Image: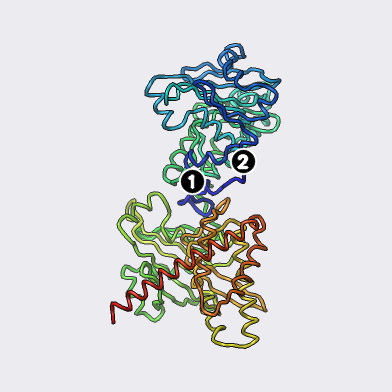
């Protein structure tokens, strides 16, 4: 099977686990390759079948006989919109679910949105890649009349086991076993929700209890969510549906609701070592060890005037932020901190905060993610968001100062100006250590939003280099790093030219490939892309500089 591009599971707006999500057009990437699946067009039928399923038989015979086989099989469900039957074909026990035609508008809607059988096929393969238990999808068939999907069929392997609803009402099953079944089901759902996927119809009838644990069925209503607001809403509906009118014993019902409630609270669990507090309209996440008496000074209404105070010093920053450095003494020690105030770039930014965290919030989450994955970044002390209503109007990030540090660009410039054998050795060691760190970061599928060398601080410790990444609001962890983002980071690094030779660049890439062996076969093509895009950006930058120079002659 082709390599699975997990990056579409990660939300842009949730904390440090997720970024972009794809629609069903993107889900097509997760289908079996042509070596393991078979696409057929037969009359008014279009089908996709697993080759193992139809091995040694003529799949067109199965397509032609599908309705006859369903009618002759054991009926599992007969509803207004679907018909489910258990049959045997090619010595395999299978379940076929037919989604019936319900009218012209119904067909038009599912032609545009994809048929329910195709969605079930896609999500079955998707959950299989995520190791979430579900019956194996063997085929889907669409009957088309013209361009419209008229009826569709989903073929799944048959799995023996009662529905969760029947399992919990079985008097022959011990109470302890039922409790364990509920716990295992919630553990399975935790894995589903971890990837921002909601089921859509999470009643007890759609969970099978097997010897190997619970199994999810009826996947055609699933949604892979892109936005936090919609995800929270659908997640809440999933949870309510799971405990609604269960009709089981009070003890089981209470246990089920208790587990669901714990999932709701764990969804809002605070990072370790932090506590949440509110001051006026400010919502604050602050480290427990930080003295709370200093918080009001940082949240003064007229923050820019604070730079006039001795303990608040304005430091250079981009035009979209203001950064202040200040010192606080506590525990008998003087501590230095940076307070970054993110300015609103447009009124639209207030609306964006409905669907994703603020810039300070994203930087906060990304920094914790870097620490969790073994990379250095200035320690975050607090996150401050002012919410006088539904909008986040102000957001600030408080970080600890990194002692005895400077940017890599400054270090390399200083080394370049100090010629000598020791300086060249120092430069080589620095480049190799940095390349190894970036290689490890990309190997763990982490993308830094702005990897210009000015955003990487370096500290030399006992002949070792440590790199601290700053400006992390666009830093994300993917499940499979997209090549375009890998290329973007490498171009950002390669833009620095002062004192860097071609040998230095080759040395960098050699160490980088050593940490990314899975893409080593692409290294020649990738290096060419990096150089081509770097030269293009440098030429544009040079042309812009010449234009400005000519304007002021």
Q: Secondary structure at mark 2?
A: helix
Tell me the residue at 36%/71% (across/down): 544
What number is the disc on residue 486?
Answer: none
Tell me the residue at 42%/42% (across/down): 230
* Quarter of the N terminus within the rendering: top right
Task: Locate residue 95: give its quadrant.
Answer: top right
> Mark 2 packing: few (<14 Cα in 10 Å), some, or many (20+)?
few
Residue 155's x, y, as percent?
A: 59, 25
Q: Earlier in the sequence, mark 2 or mark 1?
A: 1
Location of mark 1 (residue): 21
Q: Between residues 305 and 39, which one lies in front from this camera angle?
A: 39
How many labels sit on residues? 2
Vertical side of 185 occupied by 369: above or below: below
Residue 372 shows in the view: no
Task: Locate residue 396: give its quadrant.
Answer: bottom left
Tell me the residue at 53%/35% (across/down): 257
Location of mark 2 (residue): 129
Residue 445's x, y, as percent?
A: 58, 56
Q: Quick check: 475 left or right of 279?
A: right
Q: Between residues 120 and 104, which one lies in front from this camera angle?
A: 104
Q: Quick check: 401 left or right of 434?
A: left
Residue 494's x, y, as percent?
A: 53, 69
> Mark 1 packing: few (<14 Cα in 10 Å), some, or many (20+)?
many
Residue 253's x, y, as percent?
A: 56, 31
Q: Secondary structure at mark 1?
A: loop
Vertical side of 302 occupied by 444: above or below: above
Vertical side of 300 occupied by 279: above or below: above
Tell me the residue at 57%/87% (across/down): 418
Residue 340 shows in the view: yes
CA–CA distance in space, label 2 to label 1: 16 Å
């Amino acid at each position: 099977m082709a390599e699975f591009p997990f990056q579409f599971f990660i939300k842009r707006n949730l904390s440090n686990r997720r970024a972009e999500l794809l629609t069903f057009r993107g889900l097509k990437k997760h289908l079996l390759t042509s070596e393991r699946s078979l696409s057929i067009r037969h009359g008014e039928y279009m089908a996709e079948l697993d080759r193992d399923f139809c091995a040694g038989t003529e799949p067109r015979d199965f397509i032609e006989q599908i309705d006859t086989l369903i009618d002759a099989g054991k009926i599992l469900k007969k509803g207004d919109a679907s018909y489910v039957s258990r049959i045997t074909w090619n010595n395999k026990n299978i379940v076929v679910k037919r989604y019936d035609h319900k009218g012209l508008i119904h067909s038009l809607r599912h032609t545009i949105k994809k048929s329910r059988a195709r969605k079930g096929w896609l999500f079955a393969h998707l959950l299989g890649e995520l190791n979430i238990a579900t019956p194996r999808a063997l085929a889907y068939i669409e009957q088309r009349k013209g361009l419209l999907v008229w009826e569709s069929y989903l073929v799944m392997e048959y799995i023996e086991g009662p529905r969760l609803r029947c399992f919990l009402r079985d008097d022959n099953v011990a109470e302890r076993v039922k409790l364990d079944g509920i716990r295992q089901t919630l553990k399975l759902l935790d894995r589903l929700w971890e990837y921002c996927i909601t089921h859509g119809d999470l009643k007890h009838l759609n969970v099978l209890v097997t010897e190997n644990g619970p199994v999810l069925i009826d996947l055609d209503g699933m949604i892979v969510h892109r936005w936090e607001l919609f995800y929270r809403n659908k997640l809440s509906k999933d949870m309510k549906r799971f405990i609604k009118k269960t009709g089981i014993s009070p003890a089981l019902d209470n246990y089920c609701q208790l587990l669901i409630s714990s999932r709701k609270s764990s969804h809002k669990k605070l990072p370790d070592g932090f506590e949440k507090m509110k001051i006026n309209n400010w919502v604050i996440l602050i480290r427990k060890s930080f003295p709370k008496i200093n918080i009001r000074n940082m949240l003064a209404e007229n923050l820019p005037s604070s730079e006039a105070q001795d303990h608040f010093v304005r430091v250079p920053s981009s035009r979209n932020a203001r950064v202040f450095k200040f010192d606080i003494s506590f525990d008998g020690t003087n501590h230095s901190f940076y307070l970054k105030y993110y300015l609103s770039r447009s009124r639209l930014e207030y609306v964006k905060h409905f669907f994703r965290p603020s810039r300070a919030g994203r930087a906060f989450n990304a920094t914790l993610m870097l620490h969790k994955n073994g990379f250095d970044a200035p320690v975050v002390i607090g996150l401050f968001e002012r919410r006088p209503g539904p909008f986040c109007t102000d957001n600030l990030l408080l970080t600890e100062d990194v002692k005895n540090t400077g940017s890599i660009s400054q270090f390399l410039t200083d080394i370049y100006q100090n010629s000598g054998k020791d300086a060249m050795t120092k430069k080589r060691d620095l480049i190799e250590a940095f390349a190894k760190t970036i290689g490890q970061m990309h190997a763990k599928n982490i993308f830094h939003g702005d990897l210009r060398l000015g955003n990487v601080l370096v500290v030399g410790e006992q002949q070792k280099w440590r790199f601290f990444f700053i400006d992390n609001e666009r830093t994300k962890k993917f499940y499979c790093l997209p090549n375009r983002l890998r290329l973007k980071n490498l171009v950002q690094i390669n833009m620095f030219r002062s004192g860097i030779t071609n040998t230095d660049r080759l040395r960098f890439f050699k160490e980088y490939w050593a940490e990314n062996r899975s893409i080593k076969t692409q290294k020649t093509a990738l290096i060419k892309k990096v150089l081509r895009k770097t030269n293009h950006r440098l030429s544009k930058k040079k042309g812009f500089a010449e234009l400005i120079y000519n304007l002021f002659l």
